[in-house]
Amino acid sequence: MVEHQIDHRPGNKARSRALVAIVVFLAVLGGLLIAQPDNLYLWIKALHIIAVISWMAGLLYMPRLFIYHTDAPVGSDQSETFKVMEQRLLRVIMNPAMMLSWGLGLYLAWSVYGFQGGWLHAKILFVMLLTGVHIHFSRAVRAFAHDGTRREARYWRLMNEAPTVLMILIVIMAVVKPF
């Protein structure tokens, strides 16, 4: 059973499906940009929200994987399974979703708001901090992949809160626009 989880064939199929999904996403986006419908803003906003939800799902799940991975003995089948899960989550979901979130978000910030507004600057700052969390998680994936130094599970439980707090601040800035 464990061998199936770390087998590369299912990973290749998952990677291919994810690539097809990204290509379809980009094709829809490209079609919208070419067609320039009257409600283009709403389409871009919807695609941005979809990308953000995907990115947040990964950011909220990854520390849970780290917690369980920390408890798995180095070199065990369980540890090897977590390595594959972490790498797939990062490469197939989190990285593309982050890039799409940034690209669409910057497009909206420029085309709709002209990068004006204190709330927008605060939101971008919080998104930059969220990107820093993403980078931190990416480095942890590499460390786990090489059986490097592991932080305690308690650390990852605390780090699990960082994306949540930043998400709350980002949503408040985007919806309430307090300043």
Image: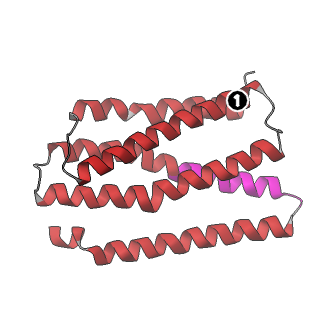
Question: Which residue: 85% across, 69% down?
Answer: 35
- Could one spot residue 104 in this view of the protein? yes
**Residue interval drawn in magenta:** 38-54
> What's the residue type where badge 1 is placed?
His
State which quarter of the image contains the C terminus.
Answer: top right
Q: Is residue 122 located in the magenta-colored stretch of the structure? A: no
Q: Is residue 43 located in the magenta-colored stretch of the structure? A: yes
Question: Which residue: 55% across, 70% down?
Answer: 21
Percent across and percent down for residue 20 are 54, 75
Q: Residues within 10 Å of mark 1 (few under 14, many from 20)?
A: some
Question: Which residue: 53% across, 33% down?
Answer: 129
Percent across and percent down for residue 135 are 44, 43
Q: Is residue 147 above or below residue 136?
A: below
Q: Nearer the viewer, residue 65 or 99?
A: 99
Q: Tell which residue pokes out farthest to the right in this image.
A: 38
- The dominant secondary structure in magenta is helix
**Image mark count:** 1
- Could one spot residue 1 in this view of the protein? no
- Secondary structure under tag 1 reads helix
Residue hosting label 1: 121
Q: Nearer the viewer, residue 165 or 104?
A: 104
